[in-house]
Image (tube, helix red, strand yellow):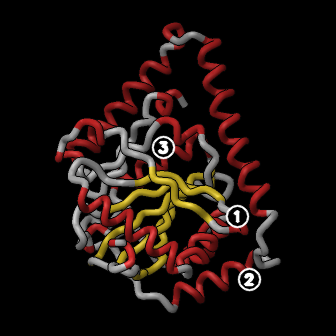
Amino acid sequence: MLLLAGAMFFSSCNKLNENKQAKYIEYKENIETVDSKKDSINKNGHIYIKRMLSNIERTNNEYLHRNFKKINFFKEEESLKYVIINFLNEKDHSPRLKNAMCSEDYYQINELSLKQNKVIYLMLKSLEDSSFSNQIGRIIKEDVEDKYSEHGGIITFKEEGNINLVCLESELAEQNDKANDNQYAIPLGAFFTRKIADFHLHAGQYDETPFTGPSEGDIFCVEEISEVFGLTNEFIITSIKKGKFNIDYLGIDTAKSSCAKTIDLGNYSYDTIKIER
């Protein structure tokens, strides 16, 4: 558990090279070595961290439960799955072409928990609203223009069952280093904020088609976070050309499975003229 206390600055990278992946693994091994030396850890501090993380998990679960009750979902879980799969069957998809790590088949909806499918349904429902897609278009434009970091943030509930994208500046942005343009390090405060999911972009340029969906680093980060928080939802938005993006769901609900699932939610358009205003 302690490795997460020091790993709040994960980079969700769409082009994570083997060198950086090796550093993550080395970091994890170092933390596990320290954790095994019980005499070097303050017992009360260790217990405090466990309680703090447990409280964060409970708060997020309560946040989901309270807001899910306000939304008119389909009464049966199988009906919800059926609706999502039928919707995705009608969409164009863009599977990852560069270093694909896993299946993105939308029939994996059948393997997700009810909570995961509710979160996906809310995203699909929001994407039917042109103003929501245009908001994503604006974030893509800002990311393309920013050469020092990927953009991202958290997703929260809005009024009437809608969701809201809250952009949070990457921890890497202040370094003003162009080497960070393909990375997003979520701020520490995001782990203590009520949310339904995280999100980040692959939009170093308008055509990032080869890098749609999660990289090895993205999957690694979600798996690490889920060890602490159980339910971990991430949306990855990839610009595939100006005016068009692909979105993928990446997540784990340890109550259902310890395996991260990636689902291509399809390609969507935004109005390039409106986002310039």
Instruction: Give the spatial CA distance, label 3 vs label 2.
Output: 31 Å
Q: Residues within 10 Å of mark 3 (few under 14, many from 20)?
A: some
Q: Position of residue 158 (x, y in %)?
A: 66, 61
Q: Earlier in the sequence, mark 2 or mark 1?
A: 2
Which residue lies at the image location 49% right of the left edge and 21% below the top edge?
35
Q: Which residue is mark 1?
A: 159
The residue carrying mark 3 is 224
Using the numbered discs, state the Cα–Cα distance from disc 3 to disc 1 in whole angstroms: 32 Å
**Which numbered disc, 3 or 1, marks the residue closer to the eye?**
1
- 247 relative to 47 in the view: left or right: left
Q: Is residue 100 left or right of residue 249?
A: left
Residue underneath mark 2: 79
Q: Secondary structure at mark 1?
A: helix
Quadrant holding the C terminus: bottom left
Question: Mark 2 and mark 1: span between their CA atoms?
Answer: 25 Å
Q: Residue at x 45, y 53 (%)?
A: 167
